[in-house]
Image (cartoon, helix red, strand yellow):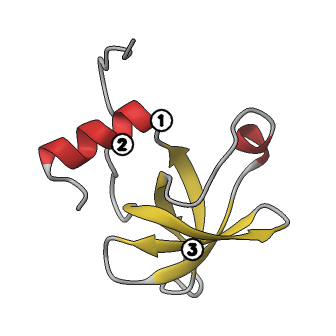
């Protein structure tokens, strides 16, 4: 049974959507972002304790002020249902 989506968070400001490419350990991930950059991203503790993240998951990445093309923070992790909705609406290929 598929859950109903009432609202899906979209990127704001300089945030971008990305897809997890590789798990690097120590709460760090290699993320291929929609803007064409591949970033090393950190996952904050609030996600670490609650969610499991896998290769192929969609996330919202906020680039750092220093080295914005190489590093960033994960600020949102999409559920599988939300990711399917984003793909069907054309936000992600």
Q: Which residue is mark 1?
A: 79
Q: Which type of secondary structure does the marked residue at label 2 adopt?
A: helix
Q: Which mark is residue 67?
A: none
Q: Residue at x 57, y 74 (%)?
A: 64
Q: Is residue 22 above or below residue 57?
A: below
- Mark pair 3, 1: CA separation: 24 Å
Q: Is residue 9 above or below residue 70?
A: above
**Extreme residue in the front direction:** 1
- Mark pair 2, 1: CA separation: 6 Å
Which one is nearer the viewer's eye here, 80 or 33? 80
Q: Looking at the figure, which quarter contains the N terminus?
A: top left
Q: Position of residue 7 (x, y in %)?
A: 30, 24
- Mark pair 2, 3: CA separation: 24 Å
Q: Is residue 25 visible?
A: yes
Q: Residue at x 53, y 44 (%)?
A: 77
Q: Earlier in the sequence, mark 2 or mark 3?
A: 3
Q: Which residue is mark 2?
A: 83
Q: Which of the two marks, 3 or 1, is nearer to us in this view?
A: 1
Q: Is residue 9 visible?
A: no
Q: Earlier in the sequence, mark 3 or mark 1?
A: 3
Q: Which residue is mark 3?
A: 64
Q: Residue at x 44, y 37 (%)?
A: 80
The local crowd at label 1, few if under 14, some if 14 to 19, many if 20 or more residues have their Cα within 10 Å, is: some
The local crowd at label 3, few if under 14, some if 14 to 19, many if 20 or more residues have their Cα within 10 Å, is: some
Disc 2 vs disc 1: Cβ atoms closer than 8 Å? yes
Q: Position of residue 69 (x, y in %)?
A: 48, 86
Which quarter of the picture shows residue 13? bottom left
Q: Is residue 55 above or below residue 46?
A: below
């Amino acid at each position: 049974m598929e859950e109903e989506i009432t609202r899906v968070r979209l990127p704001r400001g300089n945030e971008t959507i990305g897809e997890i490419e590789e798990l690097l350990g120590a709460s760090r991930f290699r993320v291929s972002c929609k803007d064409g950059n591949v970033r090393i991203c950190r996952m904050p503790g609030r996600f670490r304790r609650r969610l499991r993240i896998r290769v192929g998951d969609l996330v919202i990445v906020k680039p750092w002020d220093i080295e914005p093309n190489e590093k960033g923070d994960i600020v949102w992790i999409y559920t599988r249902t939300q990711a399917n909705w984003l793909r069907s609406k054309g936000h992600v290929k």
